[in-house]
Amino acid sequence: QVRLVESGGGLVQAGGSLRLSCALPDMVFTSYDMAWYRQAPTKQRELVAAISTGGTTIYANAVKGRFTISRDNAVKSAYLEMNSLKPDDTAVYYCNAKWFGRGQGSWGQGTQVTVSS
């Protein structure tokens, strides 16, 4: 069982910033592709951003230029820096870890991000 520990999130005004963190304290972190997903009420879970073991990144169109995904292999953590937040970014954000990008991966517990207008 892969344990993911998420932190960050909270309530912020539109235009503000937040940083999410996701740690894999028990695993060989360099073997995992990391990603952030989000799920808003009544909507399906969607990919926000992902970073491969080699550092290649992809972003959903809705967050390009505002969000940055990164990873620090030394501390076994991935991050999502969110800037210029909008009310539409309000959702529960989930961290996902896939061993060399395979299968469905493992999920974090989720963290609430609420952006007020």
Image (cartoon, rainbow, N blue to C red):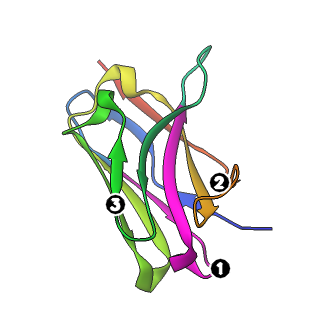
The answer to whether residue 87 is above or below residue 24 is above
Q: Which mark is residue 108?
A: 2
Q: Which residue is mark 1?
A: 27
Name the residue rendered at 67%, 80% in the picture.
26
Instruction: Select label 1 or label 3 by which is in front.
Output: 3
Left or right: where 29 falls relative to 63: right
Residue 29: x percent and y percent? 55, 77
**Dot 1 surroundings within 10 Å: few (below 14), some, or many (20 or more)?**
some
Residue at the extreme right of the image, as rendered = 1
Label number found at residue 56: 3
Secondary structure mainly formed by the magenta segment = strand
Q: Earlier in the sequence, mark 2 or mark 3?
A: 3
The amino acid type found where label 2 is placed reads Gly
Quarter where residue 75 is shown:
bottom left
Is residue 31 placed above or below 96 in the rendered structure? below
Task: Inspect the magenta stretch and tell me whether residue 32 lies in it.
Answer: yes
Q: Of all residues shown, which one is farthest toward the top?
A: 42
* Amino acid at dot 1: Met
Q: In terms of secondary structure, where does tag 1 sit?
A: loop
What is the x, y in percent for residue 39?
56, 29
Residue 11 placement: quadrant:
top left
- Give the residues in magenta: 19-38
Q: Are marks 1 and 2 in contact (CB under 8 Å)?
A: no
Position of the C terminus, as image quadrant, is top left
Measure the C-alpha gap from mark 1 to mark 3: 20 Å
What amino acid does circle 3 point to? Thr
Please state, as top left, top right, bottom left or bottom right, where the N terminus lies in the image.
Answer: bottom right
